[in-house]
């Protein structure tokens, strides 16, 4: 039941036996002592929870390859979800979805800008005040945050460093977007500036070290929740000194949609030159290597965190989640580097979980979304989910069926609102105003009308994606991912019109869904 707290190591209460009064008295006494022992024991408190949220880590193009320790300490000891998705492939709206358990159309954070509600005052007054840490805090969880929060966090228009989101006991948040050196933190509402010393300032290591101190200083009487959000593997891809020569012979994978033309796709995908010039390939290969290098420090973080939990005898009563805010691409459909697109490489994300009741070495096929993290964490903490306004659903039943009953979803929504610049990029004037994120050789990765909504269907009968664009063409893309896993062919003109009608109806319903209606799959 969702309103019962999960207790590691709980044992059945002894049954009364015999008919003699002396035996009954003895059993009653022993039962009372036993009950107190379970209630008062350290293992009787609700389970601890840790969420490691990395930045821009893909799963489709090899992003998990460097994570040998993370896979050993989390995946091999628990569950790996191979169909895990973000509902929007961009940092700020995705992180807002993680915190609230809601689709972007319900938390209203559309992109990484203040105008797009990223860490805006509107966000702070509404969805942030109802984010899942507030529930944990009310249950006397000791809460700790360190790392990147939201892209606009700490800016003057977003309340500066003095703004501490509700629900957090310890707050060590990065001001602005990911950096590894020369950044500013809000440490419990006070500004803390950092330089370029590896020992003192390298952000991934600082996040780890402060989390270890928090664990040392915690109260053993209450459970804890840690959210660790390192900058890796986001640009500027600054690896720790000891890892800067790793993977020197690695290059971005050349298979699938790499360096393929974006024919039959929306207009933005038809812009990049194909084949890509050598300058773009050199650039993206370098980015690919550096991304892997930065992840090695995250891999170390996971190992040290697990060993710390073991040393303080909390490992067996702690759930550890490892995931990313969105995927990434390096050369797919001739796009050099970025996210923001509707394709599998940008919307699929890693997800591994270990913890009480989760059997080791599970590889699970159920579709899980980043909006499911909040309800799953609250489910573990013992919150009655019927009292929480979320669009997602707990996936505790998927990884620990002995603890919960549940069903997998057959389809879900992916939505994104494009960003552009009101004037032409002076280095790339040919595309005119309205585009943004223009990389070498004038390949622009985003635009105002790179605005879309998709139904992603994934069940035993169908593996399909249907997307509609809010542009002058009312462009539609449809992919059969069973026969075309790399989404090379848009089959909108070939697919049965009745299927298109079903997909359109599902999309209309999902785009206006709120809370329970986002989990209503009765319609075909």
Image (cartoon, helix red, strand yellow):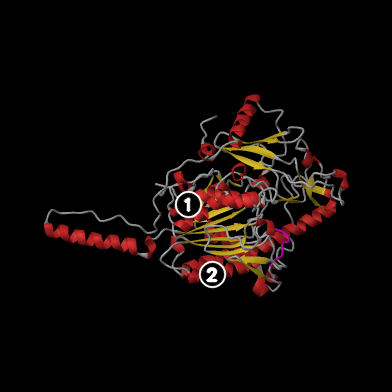
Mark 2 secondary-structure assignment: helix
Q: Nearer the viewer's eye, disc 2 or disc 1?
A: 1
Q: Position of residue 192 (x, y in %)?
A: 65, 69
Q: Residue at x 28, y 55 (%)?
A: 13
Q: Quadrant of the C terminus?
A: top right
Out of 353 and 384, give the one closest to the viewer: 384
Label disc, if present, on residue 391 of the rendered structure = none
Q: Residue at x 76, y 49 (%)?
A: 331
Q: Residue at x 52, y 56 (%)?
A: 133
- Residue range in magenta is 234-239
Residue that numbered label 2 is attached to = 212
Mark 1 secondary-structure assignment: helix
Residue that numbered label 1 is attached to = 378
Residue 444 versus residue 512 in the image, above or below: below
Q: Position of residue 218 (x, y in %)?
A: 47, 68
Calculate the distance from the C-alpha at mark 2 to the C-alpha at mark 1. 23 Å
Residues at badges 2 and 1 in contact (C-beta under 8 Å)?
no
Q: Position of residue 164 (x, y in %)?
A: 58, 60
Q: Position of residue 76 (x, y in %)?
A: 52, 57
Q: Is residue 48 left or right of residue 491?
A: left
Q: Is residue 2 left or right of residue 114?
A: left
Q: Is residue 153 left or right of residue 12?
A: right
Q: Is residue 88 left or right of residue 41?
A: right
Specify which label sits upstream in the sequence, 2 or 1.
2
Q: Residues within 10 Å of mark 2 (few under 14, many from 20)?
A: some
Residue 192 appearing in the image = yes
Residue 60 sits inside the magenta stretch: no
């Amino acid at each position: 039941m969702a309103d019962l707290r999960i207790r590691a190591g709980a044992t059945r209460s002894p049954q009364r036996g015999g008919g003699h009064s002396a035996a009954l008295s003895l059993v009653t006494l022993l039962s009372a002592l036993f009950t107190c022992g379970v209630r008062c024991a350290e293992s009787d408190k609700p389970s601890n929870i840790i969420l490691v949220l990395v930045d821009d880590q893909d799963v489709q193009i090899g992003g998990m390859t460097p994570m040998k320790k993370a896979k050993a300490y989390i995946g091999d000891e628990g569950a790996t979800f191979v169909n895990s998705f973000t509902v929007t492939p961009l940092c700020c709206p995705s992180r807002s979805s993680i915190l609230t358990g809601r689709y972007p159309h319900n938390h209203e954070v559309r992109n990484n800008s203040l105008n797009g509600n990223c860490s805006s005052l509107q966000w702070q007054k509404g969805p942030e005040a109802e984010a899942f840490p507030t529930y944990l805090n009310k249950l006397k969880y000791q809460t700790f945050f360190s790392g990147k929060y939201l892209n606009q966090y700490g800016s003057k228009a977003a309340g500066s460093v003095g703004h501490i989101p509700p629900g957090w006991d310890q707050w060590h948040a990065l001001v602005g977007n990911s950096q590894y050196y020369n950044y500013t933190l809000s440490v419990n509402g006070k500004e803390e500036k950092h330089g370029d010393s590896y020992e003192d300032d390298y952000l991934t290591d600082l996040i780890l070290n402060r989390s270890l101190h928090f664990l040392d200083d915690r109260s053993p009487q209450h459970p804890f929740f840690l959210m660790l959000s390192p900058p890796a593997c986001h640009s500027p891809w600054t690896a720790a000194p000891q890892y800067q020569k790793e993977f020197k012979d690695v290059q971005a994978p050349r298979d699938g949609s790499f360096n393929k033309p974006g024919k039959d796709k929306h207009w933005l995908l038809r812009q990049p030159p194909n084949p890509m010039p050598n300058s773009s390939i050199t650039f993206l290969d370098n980015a690919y290597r550096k991304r892997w290098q930065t992840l090695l420090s995250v891999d170390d973080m996971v190992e040290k965190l697990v060993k710390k939990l073991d040393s303080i005898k909390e490992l067996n009563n702690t759930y550890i989640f490892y995931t990313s805010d969105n995927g990434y691409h390096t050369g797919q459909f001739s796009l050099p580097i970025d996210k923001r697109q509707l394709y599998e490489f940008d919307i699929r994300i890693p997800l591994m979980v270990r913890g009480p009741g989760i059997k080791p070495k599970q590889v699970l096929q159920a579709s899980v979304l980043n909006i499911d993290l909040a309800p799953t964490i609250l489910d573990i903490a013992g919150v009655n989910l019927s009292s929480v306004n979320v669009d997602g659903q707990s996936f505790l039943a998927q990884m620990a069926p002995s603890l919960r009953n549940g069903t997998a979803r057959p389809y879900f929504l992916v939505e994104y609102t494009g960003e552009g610049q009101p004037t032409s990029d002076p280095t790339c004037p040919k595309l005119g105003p309205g585009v943004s994120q223009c990389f070498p050789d004038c390949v622009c990765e985003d635009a105002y009308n790179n605005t879309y909504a998709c139904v992603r269907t994934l069940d035993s009968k169908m593996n399909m994606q249907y997307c509609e664009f809010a542009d002058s063409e009312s462009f539609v893309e449809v992919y059969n991912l069973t026969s075309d896993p790399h989404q090379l062919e848009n089959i909108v003109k070939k697919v049965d019109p009745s299927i298109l009608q079903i997909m359109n109806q599902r999309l209309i319903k999902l785009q206006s869904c709120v809370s329970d209606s986002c989990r209503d799959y009765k319609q075909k």
